[in-house]
Amino acid sequence: MKATLQFLGGAGTVTGSKYLLQSGNTRVLVDCGLFQGFKQLRLRNWARLPVEPSSIDAVVLTHAHIDHSGYLPRLVRDGFRGPIYATAATCDLCEVLLPDAAHLQEKDADFANRHGFSKHHPALPLYTAADAADALKLLEPVPDGGPQPVAGPFAARFDPAGHILGAAIVTIGFGGRRIVFSGDLGRYDNATMVDPTPIRQADWLLVESTYGNRRHDGADPEDALAAAINRSAARGGTVIIPSFAVGRAQTLMFHLRRLKDSRRIPDLPVFLDSPMSVDASELFCRDHRAHKLTASQARAACSVARYVHTPDESKALDTNPMPKVIISASGMATGGRVLHHIKHYAPDPRNMILFAGFQAGGTRGDAMTAGAETVKIHGQYVPVRAEVDNLQMFSAHADCDEIMRWLGGFESPPRETFVVHGEPAAADALRHRVEEELGWSCHVAEHGETATLE
């Protein structure tokens, strides 16, 4: 049985993951993410896929992050009507993330139209809340393990990947053969998430390479977080933490709770200002079996922050001069309420903008951590005089050594390993290590490439 694999996203970049499996007339899309970062990448979100969405029989999601799930409403809007298979926790998170992503699309388009800074007249959202609601109706939760029949000859197995709630390493079997999609691999010995599941066999493998050329700082994350907050507090400043709503926000609150309980930081008020982060935190507390913490530990961690629900409550944070910590989405400062906080707090050198993980090229987070003196927000250039730091040890992605550790669990080499989900330098560095250290056949997948699996 012959199949093909086409790389429609997540190749040559860390975002937009979309991998199309086809055998005969059966088509399955693994992941359906938004491109983020550089404008030339974001424009791909607006281009028609090279395959008609209505011809896709099913979608399989590795996890809920927007760069893996955020294109689903557009896919449905353009004609897809099949099932979307994912773990139960991923389905729960999609019910939070996709409506929020649609709301931000609509809100940003409206803001651009009201303030006239868009080159498009009128500015339109990529998709609407109604499109997101239609996509959610197609979700089909499946248990860990499997196999789960998907479409035609394809069946999927979901094994925990760590990373975030519900994240899975997906193995798709067909005709007695297996293709493994690593999804986003989590860290080993993470404080809150489980280790990535070892996989023993694959005929073909897609492995992420977000940190394919980097090792995470070995410093203790709580030491680093405490030092950053104490520096800002000593100046009488406020700490703004742009944070991914799912996973990162909850991990940060876990460590902030420990730091406060041990009195290693001042008893500053902590605010969680992101409706999506609030909802994700409730899921984190409810679904404690999907992470390492007990129900009481999860609830204690999330209770360190005051939840901010309304826009007026969010705006009030910028008129309150009290030193504080504000955790707000998005993690790369690409949208959401955190932009308003950065506009207000970045010009003051007493304050701190504290990132906590990977910053994709072309994002405001990437620019600020590289030392940009100004950043454009809502059509205006905002001076950046606040201290900017990035605690990359909080990343939920495996670093290059951890990826190699996971690859070392295979009992025999795959026929071919495709390196995906990484910037070019990171992807090629991982390819080199896989070839040199493991002796595997390996290459970096290119956007639009089609591989024959036979």
Image: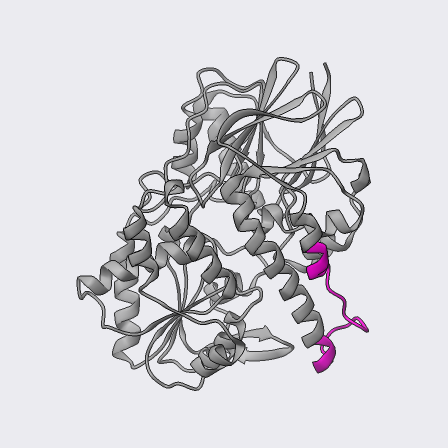
39 in magenta: no
- What percent of the width, then of the height, locates residue 220? 26, 52
Q: Residue at x 54, y 79 (%)?
A: 382
Query: Which of these two is toward me, 26 or 205?
Result: 26
Q: Is residue 50 visible?
A: no
Q: Measured along the vertical axis of the image, is residue 29 above or below residue 68? A: above
Rendering quarter of residue 61 = top right
Q: Quadrant of the N terminus?
A: top right
* Residue 217: percent from left, percent from top: 33, 49
The stretch of residues the image draws in magenta is: 112-132
Vertical relation: 61 (above or below) 66: above
Q: Camera-side residue: 310 or 386?
A: 310
**Residue 128 included in the magenta stretch of the image:** yes
Q: Is residue 89 left or right of residue 234?
A: right
Q: How many marks?
A: 0
Q: Please state if 49 lies on the left or on the right of 39 as rendered.
A: right
Figure quadrant of residue 335 = bottom right
The residue that appears at 72% across and 21% down in the rendered structure is: 3
- Magenta stretch, overall SS: loop
Residue 423 coordinates in the image, percent (x, y): 56, 46
Asked which colour scheme the image uses, the reply is: one colour
Instruction: Look at 48% across and 41% down and name the residue there.
Output: 166
